[in-house]
Image (tube, helix red, strand yellow):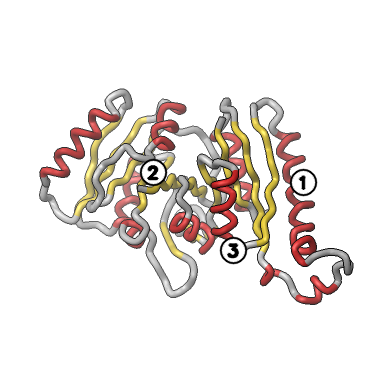
Amino acid sequence: MKNILLPTDFSENARNAIDYSMEFFKNELCTFHILNVQKASNYMMDDLMAAPANTSIHQSVVQGSKEKLSTLLKELKEEITHENYTFHALTDYDIFTDAIQQAVKSKNIDLIVMGTNGATSAREVVFGSNTLNVIRKVDCPVLVIPKGYVFEGLKTILYTIDYNDHFTTENIEPLVDTLHKYKASLRILKIKEDDTVTIAEFDDKKHLKDFFKDINHTFHSITNVPTPVAIDSFVQIMDVDMNAMFIHRETFLERFFRGSETPKISYGTRVPLLVMHN
């Protein structure tokens, strides 16, 4: 049985990520832990002062969250009656990534599924700071769903390898499981600085061929193109349904997400992004 963590702020975007998960895990035995995290800074002192004298600040802050979660779980249970799904509500009053870390450990989470913030269609999707911080700081696979993206099956999955990366099978289970579940084809994209083929790269390709021998796969490379542009172009040309990659927090991550002076990071993704950690 899989344990899936679904963070929510009760926005349309978060609900869309939950709906994607309901479709993505069809015919699997899953427990969905739906987590809402509240911060004291979200509340005015007057709101806390209005609480009954015998009610703690923590109880005051999380009560509304619990009620909304209860309503959401009731809706999901009524909508999803034909699957082996179990739902649990989690509420925390903490720093967002700390709350995620605690849930991952205490609930033995296999995958975090969460949405992005921002525009859709041909415009850039904007990763909010919460999503980016989870990718950076939480040692658990993350599936990020673009705003408004609707699950329509998985036929082709892109596996992107940075020019500094070497193939490893460690922690690759989320990608392999998805490929087998949907009998999807795999496109392996190597992003390179130049056309030089090193011995390490040759060995990597051989290892990849052996590892994915039972999966329909092809090899591709793009040279001397910025990482986000290379990925976005490939996704459009090859009609990809998901992009998977390993993240080295301060290397590929920084090239993959185009930074700005704001706490938001831009990335022109058009499909769900599966992030695995080395």
Sequence-wise, the earlier of marks 2 and 3 is 3
Tell me the amino acid under the disc marked 1. Answer: Ser
Residue tagged by mark 3?
95
Q: Residue at x 42, y 58 (%)?
A: 267
Q: CA distance from mark 2 to mark 1?
A: 33 Å
Q: Quadrant of the N terminus?
A: top right
Sequence-wise, the earlier of marks 1 and 3 is 1
Tell me the amino acid under the disc marked 2. Answer: Ala
* Position of residue 119 in the picture relative to residue 79 (left or right): left
Sequence-wise, the earlier of marks 2 and 1 is 1
Classify mark 3: residues with Cα within 10 Å, few (<14), some (14-19) or many (20+): few
Circle 2: element type: strand
Residue tagged by mark 1?
70
Q: Position of residue 98 (x, y in %)?
A: 56, 59
Q: Is residue 212 above or below residue 276?
A: above
Q: Nearer the viewer, residue 22 or 57?
A: 57
Q: CA distance from mark 1 to mark 3?
A: 22 Å
User: Pointer 2 and pointer 3: residues touching (CB < 8 Å)?
Assistant: no
Q: Residue at x 60, y 51 (%)?
A: 7
Q: Is residue 223 above or below residue 4?
A: below
Q: Nearer the viewer, residue 106 or 134?
A: 106
| Among the 4 quarters of the image, the one containing residue 79 | top right
Q: CA distance from mark 2 to mark 3?
A: 27 Å
Query: Which label sits on residue 244?
Result: 2
**Mark 1 or 3, closer to the camera:** 3
Query: Which label sits on residue 240?
Result: none
